């Protein structure tokens, strides 16, 4: 079987630019099924319909905007549907609406059915290649696709077979020349934008999804690559898959590959039907395509009204030329042309045929498609994610290496400032200050890793929405992969600090100090990861993380002694929630207990460390320092659970809450509009609806 796959890959010779000639899938559907040990259980084809789909977004100023208006259409297995329209016409919004991924401020109405049933398409039921290529910058193209394959293909499939499948997909997307080049990030120059686009597509077509959405898959590609990529997508659809893609500026050859065409302008349907009939439609509507013009260019020129003003200005300066032209577009504004085309479509047979077809498909209750994202076991997902994350962390200089350097430099500074601190009377406060700095500021520096966490979260969100793996596998992978780096950083810097300052002698005291440092840094990491899952923005995340840690430091018992901290809020519960508090209490005990300090004058008695702990630092010496350390380790687990819960909440509850808020807003808006209309018709009601202060001229605005 392995040989058969390789033979089939070999047979598909790449063209000069590296893409497979003919765009046919090197691995046929049957062979793919055999290789992956997956069977087609019944009819798993995806018939998608949408009827009277309207998307309204709530804008920042309280207004609402209708982005899509009453769209009706369908996509069938074996067909390749292209969405076209000017920039801002609503193509991405339509794809988002169909794939259940609308933005938080968007409200959807209308009916979307998959195989005649209401289904949520996120988390693996459908695959979606979005406009942004969120990839791990330190991995090569081959590694990226290979990890993705291992995350999703069945465990029992041989590694060699997975490799063969990956190589096939690399050839299919014309990526063999850059297969060993890294994707690239802020400090690594990697593959080009067009190649990144193709890697994103390769990752999704690897599993041969039943329903595939692509947002501008050919953007950034040269015309030959765009042609071959489109041909591959069409080849995929010929295997009984349903493919819907938004496409900008297709060449005439690319246009010929489309089965169905959905033309949008200003959120309205201008045309939906067979791509080959669009030419006829435009002629019938009075806008025939001139003989030497690319049909898709012509269609877009007819419906892009963004430049009407520019056109009018140009017309003024080149009057004679425009007057001679018999192009209907020169005789009217494009807004007017779009309006005429939209109206013509609503009256045409294309519109009625589409609606009839939608009703016909919707009536057939087909198979319920399960989220079919990953076929790998939970353990395989966790293992691959841990390994991938570890490789990324070890290659990304900004993730841990830079922090290690800074930690070493800072701890050498601490070591020289508190060098051989001793047991003189003045060393009591010096030891307190040193511990406070180490567990306050040194752990605080861990927020430096936040930009890398945000990048990780972006990749996670893309993969999660496409059902590549579960949330728990991600949390485990992220936690375990970070451990060796955090151990290295904290043990190295902790050791330097401990021995330069000469804190309490003894191996157990040393171990306690570095373990406490490790636990504190890991808690900060976990806290920042939880923040990154809620606030995926560098600046805001760092500000929030810094703010939280600042508050925790304040109540740690150093800047204000524990018993002096105001009891409501600050002492209970804040100081107990603060990890600085536990770290400092534990380290004070670890360092001072058992030592004898000089008195203020040479004639004074020696002061026992336990006395200082109780009387100066107000520490409960009856509580074991190991208890403080275990609280810190529990906090790591608690923060990781919080991280898991925040992701689950944002997946499961947030869309519901957002939908509810959007519905309420829309309802309020509609009620106000209805009241205003009623008030205009019934003068006696005006007083109730229009605030008395509003003048007659701006009353409608006020309403
Ligand atoms: N969540 C949202 N909030 C506010 N406005 C939105 C939102 N979603 C879409 N829009 C607006 O709706 C319009 C359509 O956006 P969309 O991204 O769907 O267009 P598009 O056709 O995909 O454009 P492009 O080809 O440039 O990507 C735009 O004017 C956009 O600003």
Image (cartoon, rainbow, N blue to C red):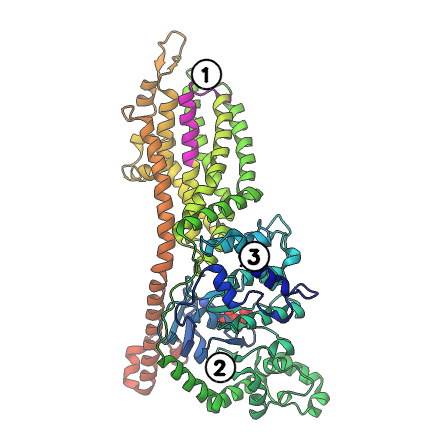
Q: Residue at x 70, y 65 (%)?
A: 16
Which of the 4 image quarters holds residue 57?
bottom left
Q: Secondary structure at mark 2?
A: strand
- Say whether residue 33 is left or right of residue 319: left
Q: Residue at x 52, y 80 (%)?
A: 260
Pick whichever of labels 1 and 3 is earlier in the sequence.
3
Residue nearest the observer in this picture, 642 or 42: 42
User: Which secondary structure is most common in the magenta stretch?
Assistant: helix
Which residue is label 1 attached to? 422
Pointer 1 with pointer 2, Cβ within 8 A: no
Pick whichever of labels 3 and 2 is earlier in the sequence.
3
Q: Which residues are magenta?
A: 500-520
Give the image location of residue 273, x and y in percent.
51, 84
Give the image location of residue 207, x and y in percent.
49, 62
Q: Residue at x 50, y 78 (%)?
A: 266
Tell me the number on the disc at residue 269: 2
């Amino acid at each position: 079987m392995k040989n058969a796959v390789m033979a089939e890959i070999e047979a598909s010779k790449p063209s000069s630019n590296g893409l497979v000639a003919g765009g046919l899938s090197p691995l046929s559907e049957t062979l793919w099924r055999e290789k992956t040990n997956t069977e087609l259980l019944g009819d798993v084809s995806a018939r998608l319909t949408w009827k009277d789909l309207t998307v309204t977004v709530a804008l920042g100023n309280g207004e609402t905007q209708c982005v899509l208006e009453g769209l009706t259409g369908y996509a069938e297995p074996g067909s390749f549907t292209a969405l076209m329209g000017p920039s801002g016409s609503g193509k991405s919004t339509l794809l988002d609406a169909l794939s259940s991924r609308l933005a938080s401020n968007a409200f959807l109405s209308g009916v979307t059915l998959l195989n005649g049933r209401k289904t949520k398409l996120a988390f693996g039921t459908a695959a979606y290649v979005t406009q942004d290529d969120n990839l791990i910058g330190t991995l090569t193209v081959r590694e990226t696709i290979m990890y993705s394959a291992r995350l999703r293909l069945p465990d029992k499939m041989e590694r060699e077979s997975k490799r063969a499948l990956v190589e096939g997909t690399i050839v299919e997307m014309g990526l063999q020349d850059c297969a060993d080049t890294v994707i690239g990030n802020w400090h690594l120059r990697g593959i080009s934008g067009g190649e990144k686009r193709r890697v994103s597509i390769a990752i999704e077509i690897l599993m041969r999804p039943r329903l595939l959405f692509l947002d501008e898959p050919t953007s950034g590609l040269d015309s030959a690559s765009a042609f071959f990529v489109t041909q591959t997508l069409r080849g995929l659809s010929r295997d009984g898959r349903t493919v819907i893609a938004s496409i900008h500026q297709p060449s005439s050859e690319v246009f010929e590959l489309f089965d169905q065409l959905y033309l949008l302008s200003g959120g309205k349907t201008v045309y939906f039907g067979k791509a080959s009939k669009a030419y006829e439609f435009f002629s019938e509507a009075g806008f025939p395509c001139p003989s030497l013009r690319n049909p898709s260019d012509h269609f877009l020129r007819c419906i892009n009204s963004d430049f009407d003003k520019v056109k009018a200005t140009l017309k003024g300066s080149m009057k004679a030329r425009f007057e001679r032209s018999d192009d209907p577009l020169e005789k009217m504004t494009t807004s007017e042309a779009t309006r005429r085309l939209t109206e013509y479509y609503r009256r045409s047979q294309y519109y009625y045929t589409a609606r009839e077809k939608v009703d016909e498909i919707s009536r057939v209750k087909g198979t319920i498609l399960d989220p079919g994202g990953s076929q790998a076991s939970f353990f395989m997902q966790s293992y691959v994610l841990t390994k991938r994350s570890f490789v990324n962390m070890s290659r990304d200089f900004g993730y841990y290496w830079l922090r290690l350097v800074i930690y070493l430099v800072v701890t050498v500074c601490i070591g020289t400032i508190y060098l051989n601190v001793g047991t003189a009377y003045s060393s009591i406060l010096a030891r307190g200050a040193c511990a406070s700095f180490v567990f306050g500021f040194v752990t605080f520096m861990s927020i430096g890793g936040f930009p890398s966490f945000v990048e990780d979260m972006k990749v996670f969100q893309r993969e999660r929405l496409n059902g590549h793996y579960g949330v728990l596998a991600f949390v485990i992978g992220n936690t375990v992969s970070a451990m060796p780096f955090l151990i290295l950083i904290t043990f190295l810097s902790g050791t330097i600090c401990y021995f330069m300052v000469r804190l309490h002698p003894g191996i157990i005291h040393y171990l306690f100090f570095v373990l406490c440092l490790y636990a504190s840094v890991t808690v900060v990491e976990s806290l920042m990861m939880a923040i990154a899952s809620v606030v995926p923005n560098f600046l805001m995340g760092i500000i929030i993380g810094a703010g939280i840690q600042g508050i925790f430091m304040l109540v740690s018992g150093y800047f204000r002694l524990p018993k002096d901290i105001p009891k409501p809020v600050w002492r209970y519960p804040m100081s107990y929630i603060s990890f600085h508090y536990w770290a400092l209490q534990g380290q004070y005990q670890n360092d001072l207990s058992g030592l004898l300090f000089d008195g203020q004058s040479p004639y004074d008695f020696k002061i026992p460390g336990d006395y200082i702990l109780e009387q100066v630092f107000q520490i409960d010496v009856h509580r074991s320092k190991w208890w403080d350390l275990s609280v810190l380790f529990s906090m790591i687990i608690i923060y990781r659970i919080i991280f898991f819960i925040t992701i689950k909440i944002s997946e499961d509850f947030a869309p519901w809450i957002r939908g509810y808020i959007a519905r309420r807003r829309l309802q309020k808006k509609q009620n106000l509009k209805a009241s205003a209309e009623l008030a205009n018709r019934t003068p006696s009601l005006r007083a109730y609806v229009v605030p008395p202060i509003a003048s007659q001229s701006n009353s409608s605005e006020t309403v």
